[in-house]
Amino acid sequence: MGTFQIDFGEERKSKIVGIDLGTTNSLIAYTDLTKPRIIEDPEGRKIVPSIVSLDTDGRLIAGEEARALLLTNPERTVYSVKRLMGRGVDDVAAEVKLFPFRIAEGSESVIKLQLGDRTFTPPEISAAVLRQLRDNAEAALGTPVREAVITVPAYFNDAQRQATKDAGRLAGLDVLRLVNEPTAAALAYGLDKRKEGIIAIYDFGGGTFDISILRLHDGIFEVLATNGDTHLGGDDIDNLLLQIALEDVQSEWGVDLARDTEGVQRLRRAVIQAKEELSFVPDATIELEYDGKRYSRAFNRELLERLIAPIIERTLEPCRACLADAKLTVEQIDEVVLVGGSTRIPLVRSAVERLFKAKPHTELNPDEVVALGAAVQAGILSGDVEDKLLLDVTPLSLGIETMGGVVSKLIHRNSTIPASATETFTTAVDGQRNVLIHVLQGERELVKDNRSLARFDLKDLNPLPAGLTRIEVRFLIDANGILNVTARDARTGKEQSIEVKPSYGLSDESVEAMIRESEEKAEEDLRERQLREVRVEADSILAATEKAQRNNAWLTLTKEEQAAVETAKRELLTVYHGSDHHVIHARMDALNAATLKLAENMVNTAVGNALKGTKID
Amino acid sequence: MSTFTRDFYHFFGIDRKLSLNEGDLQKRFYELSRQWHPDRFTRKSLEEQQEALNATSVLNDGYRTLRDPIKRAEYLLTEEGFPIGEQRSRDVPPELLEEVFDLNMALEELKGGDEDARPQLESARRNFTNMRAEIDSDLQKLFAVYDASDAQSAAAKQALHEIRGLLNRRRYVENLIRDVDRALAPSNTQTVEDRL
């Protein structure tokens, strides 16, 4: 009913959401007037599995729907793609053995995954998850969602961050900030109620591990140091257990289930279920019924702990390194916070407690806390949250290649970002027209042991005698942890053009091309969405009308007026499931017009009652 | 590129002294962070966002430099026309020649598997650490001399000259300590980076 709708105007337009784009699961949240909240999908589910499948119409679908397809349509479905973000084929050789990633031919600096007869890059896959989250948010909030804060593992390098940002762009989101997952968790915990203190955040998720140590000071969250492993998580535990179960099945059934994509996914699910149960009870069973055969294996916590102890041990070394970098001892840590689904494992909790000699915080749901923190950061950016401020650091040192394949460090790890360094480059031979700068990330001395980020080509230099041209290059790591490079001629002050060749990941041009392509596809997606949106609106108008019909004002209408409302209602309902949103809109407008008098009378009755002093509903 | 001066002292609004109160500096850092952090400029124009980004990078770079007494001194020296770095670590300070010679022998022996060199290296390490402590205490005195005199005075210039000598010496000693540490603790420290 049009006249009852309140126009929120400007306010409705600019909702910044917070997104936890996880290896296994993803969530979206926003901050309302009081506090951050997770946004549910229309079925009331908070978690969107980070699983993507190519449906028969050639569209990527994500979440629960894709999870079902992982079993029935495994060769068109992919999960844990976060492990491939910003990486090259050589990097992921180990991963490919353990995960059913189908790397397509022609994957060089950018990995392409084969889904059915098509190929997609990891950012395109992640974008499908982001789109699903965005759709859920738009349906729940009833407003367009265009701006987001997305979380990344603190230990993500430049290429991995850039790939995440690309995924956001491909999903039609303006990524206003990338926030490190452990820092987001600190924001969500509202630990700033304590005015001063040192906090350690231990974040053990599906595919990544991070440790961050922060100093709290009057609402300022200052990260002192961070460390981690971007390829260590609950996935590794699953793979370990799966290998054992596969051998078990092989000896019992005499079948190599590893060759059967559906069978292996079913067994994987059974293994994960048993693993999760063992966090709460001492005994569980891995059970699989498949292809007319049955496998059942009793499993207990003690055995699980013996198997996974080495994996958990691998998280402790980064913790010690992080403490050393923060120049702190264990005794100086005031509080410890656990984040990520894998911290539900009792052995993880006891290991953390032993290391930090403190009982860790577990009050908030470890699956939700990162998304909630992202929503708090969204509130900081929108200006709604004024008392908090996050000062994060870069996890890895940044350097350039110098003579003899040695790295010269320009910005050290754990420097507060934004951080910058300026270097002057000069020509070595007469008439030299360009200078190539190779930028790397990592802690090692030699180029070959560090991560190549990009090559920056300073082009079109004035051909002068050697050494005369001097170019000042400024390396700036922004608040997202992403490198920006600018250069100028030291003599003339003129901006110097640079061509960037990223070592891994997509060039700006190919992201643009993908966006254009998806925009074409987006037209049908848009129709789909408009349809869904208009139905949501129709629902609320129909509900309002029915409510009004129970109001006394309904009786003030003439028989004809009442009949007109009924007709308009029926007509809206007949087109409700149709495929043209314009038609539904038109019928909605008709219903609005037909109920205009009813609305007026309701207001008048209400005013009348109020004057009489009677309380109305 | 930016309208921001890279003068860290000026940006923090503090006197150009070699000794400073680190608590006050931290407080100032937090105040300026609240004022300039890019998070506060999301809804502002692109120019203002760029200005905030530049300002915050100067702030962070400045805080990193000023809160560390050695980096702070190196920075001020460079600003005052006493650039360090030419003789950084190449030339052995003459008074250390003999010790460095013995040290290199011991380092070679340990590398060759001779564990007998270990005690000698440990004693050398103690020796160098003491040396560094002495340098630090001499630096403190010279910082006070500089801070007490007019920045343009001959006394101030003389202090800076001496500080430069000490800083170069300190850097040299620091590198020796690092070499000994590496030799004594075989590299299991690289495992974290190896996983990259």
Image (cartoon, rainbow, N blue to C red):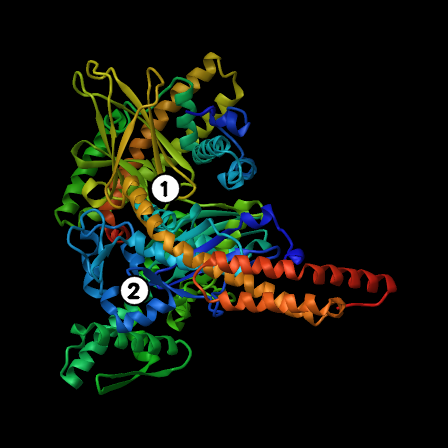
The residue type indicated by label 1 comes to Ile
User: Is A298 on the left or on the right of A387, as rendered?
Assistant: left
Q: Nearer the viewer, mark 1 or mark 2?
A: 2
Query: Residue A377: horizontal and vertical position, in percent?
Result: 51, 50
Which residue is label 2 attached to?
Answer: A55
Q: Can residue B75 be seen from the camera position used here?
A: yes
Disc 1 to disc 2, C-alpha distance: 34 Å
Front-lying residue, B83 or A213: A213
Share a chain, discs 1 and 2? yes
| Mark sitting earlier along the chain (1/2) | 2
User: Is A432 on the left or on the right of A559, as rendered?
Assistant: left
Q: Quadrant of residue A47?
A: bottom left
Question: Which residue lies at the image location 30% right of the left edge and 76% below the top edge?
Answer: A271
The single residue placed furthest to the front in the displayed view is A560
- Look at the picture and state if A378 lies above or below B90: below
Q: Quadrant of residue A98?
A: bottom left
Does dot 1 land on a helix, a strand or a loop? loop
Q: Which mark is residue A101?
A: none
Chain at tag 2: A
Total label count? 2
Q: Quadrant of residue B142?
A: top left
Q: Quadrant of the C terminus of chain A?
A: bottom right
Which residue is label 1 attached to?
Answer: A482
Does dot 2 land on a helix, a strand or a loop? loop
Query: Residue A392: horizontal and vertical position, in percent?
Result: 44, 45
Front-lying residue, A326 or A279: A279
Q: Quadrant of the N terminus of chain A?
A: bottom right
> Dot 1 surroundings within 10 Å: few (below 14), some, or many (20 or more)?
some
